[in-house]
Image (cartoon, rainbow, N blue to C red):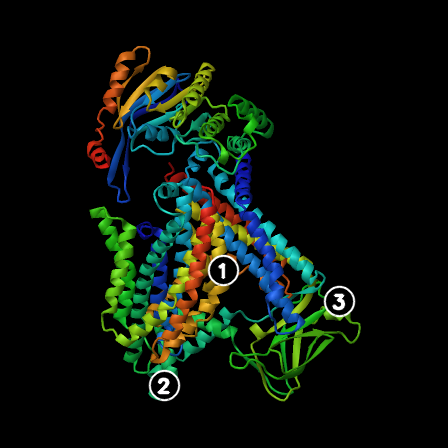
């Protein structure tokens, strides 16, 4: 987890996702029909695509790095089973993903709220995103980077780790300002449906990385993602909560129930391959 | 040259022994083979063919672009991270060779994979089918027309002070005078492109074309799009004619029709003189169409096989530019950041033209719109040598991939851009700390 | 301009800095060094004394903050200087997917050798390093000693006038160490200038004619091995004596039954 929090990849993916969720909703020419729709779809898309990219690449890199630098030998020389090692790696990736998820979701909620408030202020005219929301979105990208640079310069703290943590803090802080509780509940509920696919792809990529080299494992994982991604279309999810409807909890629960055996199967397969592999 | 070949061989060995090259070629071949079985078309033979070419070759090309971009971005950055670049740097070889050799190897692998896809496609759809040069009607350029429109509006400016000036006109003129002239001109140019021409019942419209000097005796056809943003299909009946050739159209189902023009008598010499295509509307309703977008004259060119070869060369040239860009990023940045930056740039480059096209006719009064569109236009301009030369859709719709365009793509994308980027990568290799 | 010196460093200093350009380590501090043509010169010192940084400045991989580095009277990153140079790094850094023969062919290409010359020289070097039998196996499967010999052969492929060896015996068993030393002595007899680093005094004594001991980036002693046999050992021991003892007693008490 710490290794991944220090990884430039996590910072880059998070920043790209924040940019997408902040600006896609803010661009005037994208606001077809209901004002919050674009912000919501952009936020969910950012979580979905960015999350899958982060999970696959992080899982592949963390497992391959251990195997190729032979640090896995040190770990396995202690009383750690190979299956536990693999599960621990996937758990670390999932934790890093959850940090990303919380950051982008908080930012996305602020963007959606900003669009709603902007539409209310327009009184039927051309809607503009509410200024403070846009400011929070931009601040959540830039302030942590500046603050992390200052912490690195004067206190020698790790830049990427500080930036990741501060991005989460600033994004979460934005949620507490003029927020509508029902909106938060709806957005969080529907976004939770995006976690199981990401966890599955993390487990799959880690399992593949045990057997294949980094590029091949990532390529196979992304091929599976390309086949499966249409099933997780963000606009369907956005539709589910549009018009003030609550999160469809039965659907969210079904997603978890469907993903659990797949995650378990990927981990078991990965552990079996790892056990049979000569190091 | 020897160093260049040594690096090229090294990179080819790396790609072939890590199985990346074989996986790539296999993926391209499998994709090209699998798509015809998986894709569902509109049920017509033409539709199936178009879909097959676009999906199979387009998909294989996309796979090559993504895989080779990732591989290129990893190439030099991995050498630096694993400390082998220092060993190459202390040799007397030119640093340009270290980058250019890698680009050449990646292009060679991509060319082989695309060749496999093209061969499979050619075997599947045949190579004998005719393709056509696509000619636009000769009209004033949209920019010139925009200047005229601007001048007309500016002539109305004194009306702003009149008390009985129509409020719509006041709004438009105020917005125009507040917006930058470049924005207004861009909007007018777009309007000129989309300007509709009406053809009432029993009347004739005509458009001038510049036929190639060797057009005499070659088959001609008209392609017309009878659709607007509001109406997907229009009922149309009429007769096209150019010189002594004629073609009748009667259509209620298709949004695009292709009408062959045949000659009722032998008059090959006279044809070369005739450059005006006329359309006589014999249907029951007034027809609306945009001449700049909707009317094309098709002059027979050569076969699908020859077109495929040109498209192949163009795709390889685009691939060379992408690989060179990826290698350059790998020379400047760490592996992860280079791959990420490369994919983001490719994605933004690919979607930027769509963003610009889908932008509605507004005067960009919102600052965030102005800034974001300025950025998008810059990216689109930078990516134009890649995005505007993609030949797959032209190939699928039997449009001739023009030899001049292919030559341009090979010269610019295939040679100039890789050389410039390899030189920049060589500078980066020398400057970036390498221990 | 040609000089009698193969390598010359004049008051060279190098400080490594972080992203904010704050100094982190002063690796080399005002170092003067010269290696004459045909000489075998040893750069000795404990880990972190600045040997590898000095070598990398000589190779042009790192630029010095102050002072001047010259190879045969020319800047180290000039192509003409690099043409006369061979380099063996501290670790072998080979492409694991290539065979020894392919590795040598690759470096021959980078040195600009034509096909026939390269083939002849690869054959000679494979024989010399006793790798002819394993020449067509991927080097990823080689033992450390074999990989070291491939790296040495690739350093020699361009027939360099100056051979720079960074810890050439690092990680080798005594037999392989002896083989490398013998090879270096043979090359020196042939007139090649050799600059090698080591943290083992025995290596320098066996191979080098002249030496310099570095500590904290400064030269603490230099001279000919034959003239300074006794003081050499004292200097070297003084340089490495700053190390602290490991405190093992509490650990042993904790683990004892």
Q: Is residue C219 visible?
A: yes
Q: Do discs 2 and 3 share a chain?
A: yes
Q: Nearer the viewer, residue A86 or B87?
A: A86
How dense is the environment of label 1, judged by Cα within 10 Å: few (below 14), some, or many (20 and up)?
some
SS assignment at label 3: loop
C217 relative position to B319: left or right: left
The chain identifier of the residue carrying mark 1 reads A
Residue C82 position, x and y percent, is 44, 29
How dense is the environment of label 3, judged by Cα within 10 Å: few (below 14), some, or many (20 and up)?
some
SS assignment at label 1: helix
The chain identifier of the residue carrying mark 3 reads B
The chain identifier of the residue carrying mark 2 reads B
Label 1, on which residue? A224
How many numbered marks are there? 3
Label 3, on which residue? B217
Distance from disc 2 to disc 3, alpha carbons, whole Å, reads 57 Å
């Amino acid at each position: 987890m710490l290794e991944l929090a220090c990884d430039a990849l996590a910072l880059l993916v998070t920043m790209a996702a924040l940019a997408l969720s902040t600006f896609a909703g803010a661009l005037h020419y994208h606001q077809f029909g209901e004002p919050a729709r674009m912000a919501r779809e952009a936020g969910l898309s950012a979580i979905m695509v960015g999350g899958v990219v982060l999970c696959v690449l992080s899982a592949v890199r963390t497992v391959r790095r251990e195997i190729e630098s032979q640090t896995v030998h040190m770990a396995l020389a202690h009383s750690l089973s190979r299956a536990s090692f693999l599960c621990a790696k996937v758990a670390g990736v999932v934790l890093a993903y959850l940090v990303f998820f919380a950051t982008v979701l908080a930012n996305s909620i602020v963007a959606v709220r900003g669009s709603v408030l902007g539409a209310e202020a327009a009184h039927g005219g051309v809607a503009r995103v509410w200024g403070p929301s846009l400011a929070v979105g931009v601040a959540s990208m830039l302030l942590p980077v500046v603050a992390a640079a200052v912490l690195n310069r004067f206190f020698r703290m790790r830049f990427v780790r500080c930036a990741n943590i501060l991005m989460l803090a600033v994004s979460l802080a934005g949620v507490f300002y003029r927020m509508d509780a029902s909106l938060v509940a709806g957005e969080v509920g529907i976004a939770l449906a995006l976690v199981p696919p990401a966890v599955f792809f993390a487990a799959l990529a880690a399992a593949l990385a045990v057997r294949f080299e980094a590029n091949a494992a990532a390529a196979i994982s992304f091929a599976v993602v390309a086949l499966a991604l249409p099933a997780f279309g963000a606009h369907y999810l956005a539709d589910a909560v549009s018009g003030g409807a609550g999160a469809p909890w039965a659907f969210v629960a079904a997603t978890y129930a469907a993903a659990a055996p797949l995650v378990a199967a990927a981990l078991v397969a990965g552990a079996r391959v790892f056990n049979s592999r000569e190091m | 040259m020897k160093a260049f070949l040594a690096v090229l061989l090294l990179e080819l060995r790396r790609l072939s022994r890590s199985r990346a090259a074989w996986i790539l070629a296999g993926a391209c071949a499998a994709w090209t083979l699998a798509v015809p079985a998986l894709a569902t078309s509109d049920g017509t033979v033409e539709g199936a063919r178009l879909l097959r070419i676009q999906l199979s070759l387009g998909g294989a090309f996309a796979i090559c672009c993504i895989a080779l971009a990732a591989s290129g971005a990893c190439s030099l950055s991995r050498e630096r991270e694993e400390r082998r670049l220092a060993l190459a740097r202390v040799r007397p070889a030119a640093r340009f060779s270290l980058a250019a050799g890698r680009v050449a190897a990646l292009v060679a692998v991509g060319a082989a994979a695309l060749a496999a896809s093209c061969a499979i496609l050619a075997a599947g759809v045949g190579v004998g089918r005719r393709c056509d040069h696509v000619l636009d009607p000769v009209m004033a350029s949209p920019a010139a027309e925009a200047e005229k429109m601007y001048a007309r509006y500016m002539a109305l400016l004194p009306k702003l002070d009149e008390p009985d000036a129509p409020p719509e006109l006041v709004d438009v003129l105020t917005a125009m005078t507040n917006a930058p002239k470049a924005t207004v001109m861009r909007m007018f140019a777009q309007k000129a492109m989309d300007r509709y021409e009406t053809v009432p019942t029993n009347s004739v419209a005509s458009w001038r074309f510049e036929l190639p000097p060797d057009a005499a005796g070659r088959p001609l056809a008209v392609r017309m799009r009878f659709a607007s943003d509001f109406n997907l299909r229009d009922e149309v009946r009429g007769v096209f004619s150019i010189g002594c050739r004629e073609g009748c159209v009667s259509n209620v189902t298709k949004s695009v029709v292709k009408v062959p023009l045949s000659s009722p008598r032998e008059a090959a010499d006279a044809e070369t003189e005739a450059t005006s295509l006329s359309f006589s509307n014999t249907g029951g309703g007034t027809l609306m169409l945009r001449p700049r977008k909707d009317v094309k004259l098709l002059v027979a060119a050569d076969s699908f096989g020859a077109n495929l070869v040109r498209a192949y060369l163009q795709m390889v040239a685009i691939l060379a530019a992408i690989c060179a860009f990826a290698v350059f990023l790998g020379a400047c940045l760490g592996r992860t950041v280079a791959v990420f930056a490369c994919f983001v740039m490719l994605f933004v480059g690919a979607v930027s033209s769509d963003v610009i096209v889908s932008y509605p006719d507004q005067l960009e009064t919102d600052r965030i719109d102005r800034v974001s569109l300025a950025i998008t236009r810059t990216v689109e301009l930078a990516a134009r040598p890649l995005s505007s030369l993609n030949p797959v859709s032209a190939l699928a719709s039997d449009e001739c991939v023009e030899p001049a365009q292919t030559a341009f793509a090979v010269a610019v994308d295939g040679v100039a851009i890789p050389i410039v980027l390899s030189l920049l990568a060589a500078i980066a290799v020398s400057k970036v700390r390498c221990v | 301009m040609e000089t009698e010196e193969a390598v010359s460093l004049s008051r060279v200093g190098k400080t490594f800095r972080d992203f904010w350009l704050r100094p982190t380590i002063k690796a080399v501090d005002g170092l003067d060094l010269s290696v004459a043509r045909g000489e075998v010169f040893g750069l000795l010192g404990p880990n972190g004394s600045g040997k590898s940084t000095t070598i990398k400045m000589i190779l042009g991989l790192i630029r010095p903050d102050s002072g001047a580095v010259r190879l045969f009277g020319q800047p180290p990153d000039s192509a003409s200087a690099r043409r006369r140079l061979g380099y063996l790094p501290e670790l072998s850094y080979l492409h694991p997917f290539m065979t020894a023969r392919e590795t040598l062919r690759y470096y021959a290409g980078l040195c600009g050798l034509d096909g026939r010359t390269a083939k002849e020289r690869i054959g000679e070097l494979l024989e010399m390093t006793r790798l002819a039998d394993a020449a067509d196996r991927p080097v990823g499967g080689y033992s450390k000693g074999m990989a070291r010999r491939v790296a040495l052969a690739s350093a020699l492929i361009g027939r360099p006038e100056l051979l720079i060896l960074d810890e050439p015996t690092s990680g080798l068993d005594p037999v392989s160490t002896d083989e490398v030393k013998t090879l270096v002595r043979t090359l020196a007899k042939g007139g090649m200038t050799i600059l090698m680093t080591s943290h083992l005094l025995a290596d320098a004594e066996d191979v080098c004619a002249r030496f310099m001991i570095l500590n904290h980036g400064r030269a603490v002693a230099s001279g000919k091995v034959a003239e300074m046999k006794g003081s050499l050992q004292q200097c070297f021991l003084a340089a490495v004596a700053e190390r602290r003892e490991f405190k093992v007693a509490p650990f042993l008490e904790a683990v004892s039954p």
